[in-house]
Amino acid sequence: MPVVAVVDGVKIAFYANEHPPAPFHAIIAEHRAVVDIATAKLVEGSLPVAKRAKVLEWAAARRQVLLARFVAAMAHEKVEPVE
């Protein structure tokens, strides 16, 4: 599970066994969520409201970079961090 960023304390990670549509996982404490990269919408799980807003805003501004990192993770390549 490559962690590519930490957004306001929320770890952003990819799992190598994912399938399209491209998601990333957002993890903080006991909260786990799956976010669709293309739409920057939460599709599964939950995050605290304030954290969710920051993660979704962050993701929306970085769609293309996140999609590229998703492709790299699926190819089992090194996944660079996302700013």
Image (cartoon, rainbow, N blue to C red):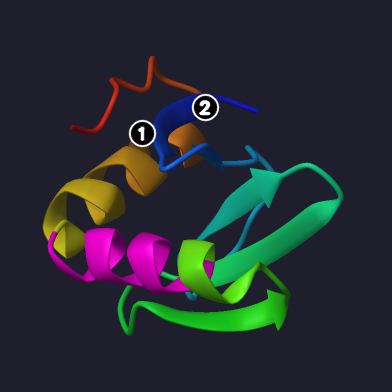
Q: Is 21 located above or below residue 30 in the figure?
A: below
On the image, which quarter does residue 61 sit in?
A: bottom left
Residue 20: x percent and y percent? 51, 71
| 37 horizontally vs 83: left or right | right
Q: CA gap, disc 2 to disc 1?
A: 13 Å
Q: Main secondary structure of the magenta part?
A: helix
The amino acid type found where label 2 is placed reads Val
Viewer-proximal residue among 82 and 58: 58
Q: Which residues are magenta?
A: 52-61
Residue 59 magenta-drawn? yes
Residues packed near mark 2 inside 10 Å, few (<14), some (14 to 19) or many (20 plus): some
Q: Quadrant of the N terminus?
A: top right
Q: Is residue 49 visible?
A: yes
On the image, which quarter does residue 32 sit in?
A: bottom right
Check residue 58 in the rendering and tell me which mark sits there, or answer none.
Answer: none
Q: Quadrant of the C terminus?
A: top left
- Secondary structure beneath dot 1 equals helix
Q: Is residue 20 visible?
A: no
The amino acid type found where label 1 is placed reads Ala
First-in-chain label (2 vs 1) = 2
**Residue bearing mark 2:** 3
User: Which is closer to the viewer, label 2 or label 1?
Assistant: 2
Q: Residue at x 66, y 67 (%)?
A: 47
**Residue bearing mark 1:** 72
Residue 12 magenta-drawn? no
Residues packed near mark 1 inside 10 Å, few (<14), some (14 to 19) or many (20 plus): some
